[in-house]
Image (spheres, coloured by chain):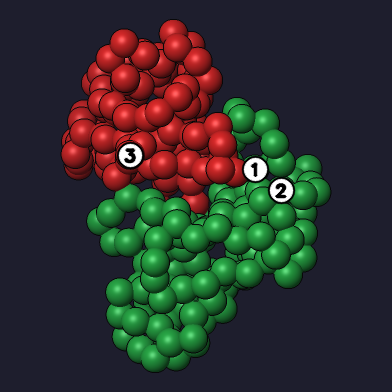
Amino acid sequence: SQTIHQWPATLVQPVGSPLSLECTVEGTSNPNLYWYRQAAGRGLQLLFYSVGIGQISSEVPQNLSASRPQDRQFILSSKKLLLSDSGFYLCAWSSWGGAYNEQFFGPGTRLTVL
Amino acid sequence: GDSVTQMEGPVTLSEEAFLTINCTYTATGYPSLFWYVQYPGEGLQLLLKATKADDKGSNKGFEATYRKETTSFHLEKGSVQVSDSAVYFCALKLNNQGGKLIFGQGTELSVKP
């Protein structure tokens, strides 16, 4: 069966510090991968998605970047965190191709920038 | 552009009450529609989905019907339980661009015993 992991589960970082959040998927090959952010009291916003290794699409201009160094690994990064980067970050995957494939979400990382 | 609009929360109901959470969408083409649920402190789980007009998705007593004429996908449950307390997200999935999801802002449901 497929599983998706995210770490760390929680993170408290000072403003201006770097960030690296990792997401890995097991039990599937060539998945589509997604990073979402859920700010406090707000809905989910798609940040990045990837349809293959090294292929990243950015949805909103921001302080963050994403990379996909391996087929089932998706990394969210920042060189210098801002207060506004605080939120709940969710990684998701779906099967490659197939218009109706659902997305499966990881447990999330709660980031607090102080 | 493509978007999803949900009724604002929080919604507070007594146990066994009837639930409706409204969801309307704007999309080019023919998207798939989803309801996701987020229990406190957890990630999102798919609750139900519908892939074409007039499809009805159902799961755990929840139902939603894909209404193309009204561009709606309202979530309903006949008798809610305390364990249904969560945040509910309506979403549409574009059938291109990697199949990305566009979410509504979420509706918090609180069920009191």
How far apart marks 2 and 1 lie (CA) works out to 6 Å
Q: How far across and down, in percent of the image, does residue A8 sit?
A: 57, 73
The chain drawn in green is A
Q: Which residue is mark 2?
A: A31
Circle 3 residues within 10 Å: few <14, some 14–19, many ≥20 = few
Image disc number at residue B22: none
Q: How far across and down, in percent of the image, does residue B69 sit?
A: 31, 11
Residue A1 seen from this side: yes
Mark 2 touches mark 1? (CB < 8 Å): yes
Chain letter of the residue carrying label 2: A
Mark 2 touches mark 3? (CB < 8 Å): no
Label 2 residue SS: loop
Q: Quadrant of residue B2?
A: top left
Q: Quadrant of residue B11?
A: top left
Q: Which residue is mark 1?
A: A94
Amino acid tagged 3 = Gly
Q: Quadrant of the N terminus of chain A?
A: top right
Up-down relation of residue A12 to residue A100 (above or below): below
Q: Which residue is mark 3?
A: B1
Chain letter of the residue carrying label 1: A
Circle 2 residues within 10 Å: few <14, some 14–19, many ≥20 = many
Label 3 residue SS: loop
Task: State whether discs 2 and 1 lie on one chain.
Answer: yes
Label 1 residue SS: strand
Identify which residue, A64 or B21, lies in the foreground: A64
Residue at image coords 37%, 30%: B27
Amino acid tagged 2 = Pro
How far apart marks 2 and 3 lie (CA) works out to 26 Å
Residue at image coords 55%, 32%: B95
Nearer to us of marks 1 and 3 is 3
The chain drawn in red is B
Up-down relation of residue A110 to residue B108 (above or below): below
